[in-house]
Image (cartoon, rainbow, N blue to C red):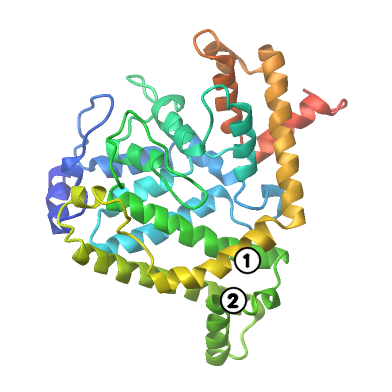
Amino acid sequence: MLKRIDLEKKEGLLAPYAQKSKDSLGRCHKEAEHPYRSCYQRDHDRIIYSTAFRRLEYKTQVFVNHEGDYYRTRLTHTLEVAQIAKSIARALGLNEDLVEAISLAHDLGHTPFGHSGEDALCEIMKDYGGFDHNTQGLRVVDLLEERYPEFPGLNLSYEVREGIIKHSTVYDPPRSSDSFKQTASPLLEIQVVDAADEIAYDNHDLDDGIHSRLIKEEDLSGISLWETKERHIRKLYPRLKDKVRKYQIIRSLINDQITDILTQTDNNIKHYKIKRPQDATKLPQRIVAFSKGMEKLRKPMREFMQNNLYHHYRVVRMSNKAHRFITALFNVYSDKPEQLPPSTQARLKKEEKHQVICDYIAGMTDRFALDEYKKFFEPYERV
């Protein structure tokens, strides 16, 4: 039987710049190590069993859950990020267990209704400490999850917590925190998760957009990243069904972007002589990156998605509606906090009212938030 110490020895086969579990900076609350799981494997399991992780099933990615069963939710997106991130980490000789744990935790702080819910809470909380889902994710794993008698939260390792707070994409700027070392860049494992997140939502949102018919395939003509793959797939399989052809194009796009990022990252590691995990954190530029050629190809596609999907009138309508839901619920709870459930009310004795309400709303699923709204604002709905 493999014990933890054996697993830690096996990590000696990883690249020298990989973060090893035996070198972790530890946990906020001291615990005995597990006999047959590394600290990052243990973190992975704690995240999987958390309430916040289960709730991701009914939180919006782009399309609200009731729009249909096909579309990605925040949970399926998270699983797809983990799959892509692990593939990249494995090829680069990085720590897959750490990468998977960060991937599974990176969206735990997301609100109902996606970024529109986050925007609403950000506006409401601007005079009360602000709001962003990275910081909220850290609150979830450090304070809000209640599962252990010895400490609040999940008591995750330093590196997984750092991956949550320093998560960074075009849509998710990183946050600084006094609890973490200030470095020019995060660990390579954290950079891998950020890159995987971009690959996942760019391509899978495109898939969902086409399936929803908010985007038509013919609208993508002129975008070389799409056109090149479409011609290639049509040439290989001229009689494919439309949905299979679309899947093969998306699959090929993801594969090309992963291949590109692996090649460019490997070149960067050699160029900057990355020998230890700390070497990458001292550089202002990210080591895990696309080539300039791929970045040039991706830009028109991302601009197309912004203009034609994320700003589609139906998506904007839903986003605006969600903003109103969140704002109305917050105002109702703030006016009469006695309407909050008893467990949440109990926190008001020690914590600031706005933060307690913010935590409560941020933890809601789309469905629960909609039900709460109906109870408060539809006169014949039972409360």
| x then y, percent, for residue 78 | 48, 51
Amino acid found under the numbered disc labelled 1: Phe
Front residue (pair 354, 365): 354
Which label is found at residue 135? none
Q: Identify whether 332 is placed above or below 267.
A: above
Amino acid found under the numbered disc labelled 2: Ile
For residue 265, side relative to residue 10 (left or right): right
For image coordinates 73% across by 58% down, the residue present is 312
Secondary structure of the residue carrying numbered label 2:
loop
Which label is found at residue 304? 1
Q: Gap between marks 1 and 2, in whole Å?
A: 9 Å
Secondary structure of the residue carrying numbered label 1:
helix
Which label is found at residue 223? 2
Front residue (pair 3, 207): 207
Q: Identify whether 119 is placed above or below 169.
A: above
For residue 330, side relative to residue 137 (left or right): right
| x then y, percent, for residue 145 | 45, 28
Front residue (pair 151, 321): 321
Farthest residue to the right: give it: 380
| x then y, percent, for residue 347 | 52, 14
For image coordinates 41% across by 32% down, the residue present is 141
- Is residue 59 visible in the rendered image? The answer is no
Question: Pointer 1 and pointer 2: residues touching (CB < 8 Å)?
Answer: yes
